[in-house]
Image (spheres, grey):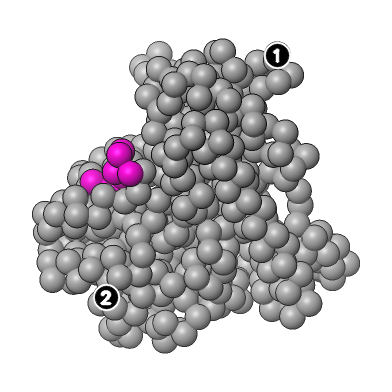
Amino acid sequence: MFEKLKAQPADKILMLMQMYREDPRDTKIDLGVGVYKNAEGVTPVMRAIKAAEHRLWEEQQTKAYVGLAGDPAFSDAMIQLILADAVPRNNVAAAATPGGTGAVRQAFELIQMANPDARVFVSNPTWPNHLSILNYLGIETVSYRYFDAETRGVDFEGMLADLKGVRRGDVVLLHGCCHNPTGANLNLVEWAAVIDVLNAAGAIPMVDIAYQGFGDGLEADAEATRLVASSVPECLIAASCSKNFGIYRERTGLLMAISQDTSAHALNQDTLAFLNRQNFSFPPDHGARLVTMILNDADLRADWARELEDVRLSMLSLRQDLADELQRLTGSDRFAFLAQHRGMFSRLGASPELVEQLRTQHGIYMIGDSRMNIAGLNAKTIPILARAIVDVGV
Ligand code: LMR
């Protein structure tokens, strides 16, 4: 049997992590995988997580199963964090999943189950694993224009024109904030225009929100998702706690299926639980429990929000410092977009050949499409990166 297996295409992000690890140069700079790092290059356990873990260790009496959709208290807390009062709680079916990727995967399976003819529209570019999972499941994908290679902003006209090609029942995958891989985002007026196009055609939005709190703040980053949820008859939302709670390996995420028709709620909820049962049975609990404890405790929550805000501000100042340094070296504003992008990533707009030169000649690791993890920088490496960008001629 095993001799029939075929080698699968390597995941670009994970492959780069491996190459970085194997590079012996001590001057190497890792701008690859989307993991937050502080100025010392460490991905810290957040203070509130440590405190919640301590409390959990003291208080938890059992590790028995919770429920197929996870603990309803986790769903409640996350729905409140992401949606606030955008939709009545009764309209939201929700299930905990293994990380944001688990939520994305379950969402795609739900789409396939509900409408095998649905096509999924994805931004060009999108997170590579979106496409990989869609292809794996045999779901037809259509890409819509998103990134303007000239301005390094959103090609909004192109995006709207391509989205006008949706058919009733198609699903359009949107990044709720901090677009991965580009860092370029829609404003709320543009979001409203996208929603109008989807509503007019009867297409369903699916929002992937993996970086709430990393862009313009916890509330601002959720506004587009709230607008979608309150303006369409049905939508899906896949949320991740990996980044904003720093609990990557705990695999903590939530899938929401929202319908304005409250009579759909019970069936939607049962379907999410069924899909969990088929794929992994009960979702992981540890991370979800910590998140619930933090969101429901005023002190822990305030401390978490403070630390997250520090993380966000530090990434913003890294962006600004890099843009300033490049301005100084080139005497032009052509890298000003770096300070305007939001979230962990920016697409530099360098060709794969130049990305390769940055790696081989300068030990700078970014994804082949020139996505940089801004959090991989610090005061010492910003001038090195800026000089290398100028040297290779980006
Ligand atoms: C990324 O885009 O780098 C992160 O979401 C990590 C991953 O799993 O790819």
- Contact, mark 1 vs mark 2 (Cβ under 8 Å): no
Disc 2 crowd rating (10 Å Cα; few below 14, some 14-19, many 20+) is some
Tell me where residue 257 appears, x and y as whole percent.
37, 69
Tell me where residue 378 appears, x and y as whole percent.
69, 39
Give amino acid for label 1.
Pro
Find the magenta span and give its range.
Answer: 145-151
Instruction: Describe the element under mark 2 as helix, strand or loop.
Output: loop
Q: Residue at x 19, y 66 (%)?
A: 198
Q: Nearer the viewer, residue 346 or 11?
A: 346
User: Mark 1 — residue?
Assistant: 24
Q: Is residue 133 above or below residue 170?
A: above
Question: What quarter of the picture does the N terminus occupy?
Answer: top left
Q: Residue at x 36, y 75 (%)?
A: 227
Per the picture, the main secondary structure of the magenta-coloured stretch is loop
Tell me where residue 231 appears, x and y as whole percent.
29, 78
Instruction: Describe the element under mark 1 as helix, strand or loop.
Output: loop
Q: Quadrant of residue 165?
A: bottom left
Give amino acid for label 2.
Val
Q: Is residue 232 visible?
A: yes
Instruction: Look at the image and say whether residue 150 sits in the magenta stretch.
Output: yes
* Residue at the far front in the pictured view: 331
Horizontally, residue 99 falls left or right of residue 121, namely right
Task: Give the CA distance from mark 1 to mark 2.
Answer: 52 Å
Tell me where residue 352 appears, x and y as whole percent.
39, 22
Q: Is residue 116 visible?
A: no
User: Mark 2 — residue?
Assistant: 232
Of mark 1 and mark 2, the one earlier in the sequence is: 1
